[in-house]
Amino acid sequence: MYEPFSKETGVRVDVVHIPTYAELLSQIREGPRFDLIDIDMSALALFEKDDATQELDYDRLGNTRNAGIARSLLTSHGVGKNYWASVMAYRTDAFGGRAPETWADFWDTRVFPGSRALQSPEAGPPEVEFALLADGVAADRLYPLDVDRAFAALDEIKGAVRRFWGDGATPGLLLERRQVAATTVWHGRPSHLIERGAPLAYQWNGARRQSNGYGIPHGARHPDAAYRLIDFALRPRVQAALAGLYPMGPVVPAAYKYLPRAAADLASSPEHLYTGFDLDIGWWVENKEAVIKRWHEWVRS
């Protein structure tokens, strides 16, 4: 994206990698050496809460108008740029020809025997929504999360959980090495293993969608360039080009006109949009610390 943007506008883009939220926040307060933040929308909500980012002027973002972008991604201090999802992955040779289709199947180690893996809080919000879906809660009734009910459901599967993974590469490797039969995973991460012939597959029902997005820090020296880059990134053709290179779902529905169906197995593709749910950022901003504390207590118990 950056090279064609620079060719079109004459604006050079330099990328600065800052690994943690705390470091980003500290640099913003000291006077940022960056003009645009590319990060997940949950972090942008925290930046807004910490008064670290500017309120966006949507009059300067023409490609957001009537583009079909979800309202939850057009926030006062952040605009979504792409979707990703946590889904179920499993070994296709593990269950005698059967395939798990729901989180209830993932929880059912009698019908679908074998070890499981779940995401640890170091990699993102604990996956308590999956426990609630397994326990019969409808996807459109998840929030506010019933945390007590979720941990009661997690108790039912705890004995089968072999690993709590903390990075995107581990779930695929656990499956490939037969250390688990099924795991939660960030969609797209084990794709190279599947392409190499590993007997792995995804299951999209009940996918937990999240989004990355853009925000502009207070003290940005080149806000005009930041707005231009955001608007460029939200063009349908640019969204499609990015999705063709890496499996992140476009937020602009028109991008799918430029994606071949074979490349459209993404979190925001029409066939998946209504089988999953969007993580409720507001709920998690308010409750994440308490849920993580309880998660660690549950793991130790």
Image: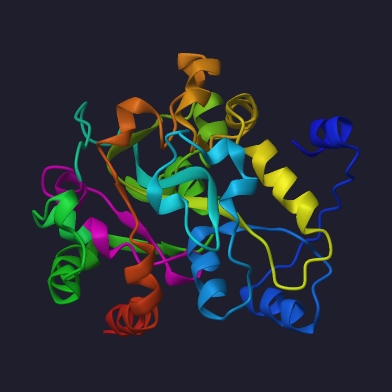
Image coordinates of residue 129 in percent, x first then y, are 25, 60
> Is residue 179 at all visible to an observer of this figure?
no
Left or right: 148 with respect to 55?
left
Label total for image: 0
The verdict on residue 137 being magenta is no
Image coordinates of residue 8 in percent, x first then y, are 84, 30
Give whichever of 197, 40 is nearer the camera.
40
Left or right: 133 with respect to 52?
left
**Is the C terminus in the top left, top right, bottom left or bottom right quadrant?**
bottom left
Dividing the picture into quadrants, the one containing residue 131 is bottom left
Left or right: 215 with respect to 224?
left
Q: Height in image: 22 above or below 234?
A: below
Image coordinates of residue 200 in percent, x first then y, are 40, 33
Left or right: 211 with respect to 228?
left
**Is the N terminus in the top left, top right, bottom left or bottom right quadrant?**
top right
**Residue drawn at 34 percent across, 26 percent down:** 270
